Amino acid sequence: MSRMRGMIIAIDGPAASGKGTIAKLVAEHFGFHCLDTGLLYRAVARDVERAGFRLEDTWAAVSYARGLDAATLDDPALRGAEAGDRASVVAKIPEVRRALLKYQRAFAERPPGAVLDGRDIGTVVCPDADAKLFVTATAEVRAERRFSELRARGDTTTGYAAVLAAIRERDARDSGRADAPMKMAADADLLDTTQLGIEAAFDAAVGLIKRKIGQQGAA
């Protein structure tokens, strides 16, 4: 990437780890742009299904990834665990990931800076990011968070055990895919939110980012 770009902060991690909320708060704190890259894959899955194709139909997924309209990323249908699970299916397709890579990298170049959250930002999308975080928590705690979200939305049919099983299945898909698997970058800082509320997690994230930026400035 060109060094004329703004600052780039990469935030990766598994589902319900808190990375999305942290990314938004960090972006607001620094006055940067923010991109939830998972929305791109959710949008592709949405478009594929709306057209009547299966998520596993590679040619359809690639076609809709190449023609994705970024203006539709605020679609409420893209929110929720089910949309995320569908996204993880198309995200396994290497050609889909390549089709969306250009958009993500172009977004990351926006001045004065950008925060991108996902699962391969620090390893693939922005390997030269100025600061990298890998946000995680135990599967049990992440399932509790997702379960509470479902209850808050009025879902009384999905039990905690089912949510935990879905979290573990999602983790396996994301970390086990052959192309750009979810993993912590070698130069990323680990932020475990298992015992942290969102304010404490945000404070920890900002501290880690400032330390990394300060180290670069002193180099």
Image: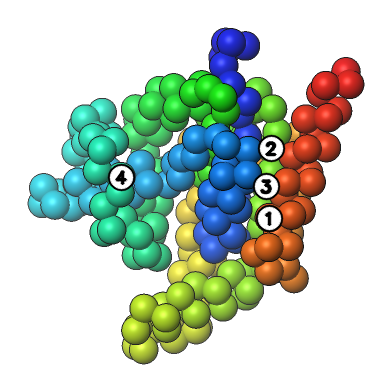
Q: Which residue is drawn at 19% across and 46% down?
A: 47
Marks 3 and 4, how far apart at CA: 24 Å
Question: Foreground residue, 113 or 1?
Answer: 113
User: Which numbered disc, 1 or 2, marks the residue closer to the eye?
Assistant: 1
Quick one: label 4 or label 2, which is nearer the N terminus? 4
Disc on res. 134: 3
Q: Where is residue 61 in the image (x, y as percent from the top left)?
A: 25, 39
Q: Position of residue 101 (x, y in %)?
A: 42, 27
- For mark 1, give the secondary structure: helix
Instruction: Name the residue that disc number 1 marks.
Output: 202
User: Which numbered disc, 4 or 2, marks the residue closer to the eye?
Assistant: 4
- For mark 2, give the secondary structure: strand
For the residue marked with disc 4, what is the amino acid? Leu
Disc on res. 59: none
User: Which numbered disc, 3 or 4, marks the residue closer to the eye?
Assistant: 4
For the residue marked with disc 3, what is the amino acid? Phe
- For mark 3, give the secondary structure: strand
The extreme right residue here reads 218
The extreme bottom residue here reads 156
User: Which numbered disc, 3 or 1, marks the residue closer to the eye?
Assistant: 1
Quick one: label 3 or label 1, which is nearer the N terminus? 3
Instruction: Name the residue that disc number 2 marks.
Output: 132
Asked if the residue at tag 1 contacts the one at tag 4, i.e. Cβ–Cβ closer than 8 Å, the answer is no
For the residue marked with disc 1, what is the amino acid? Phe
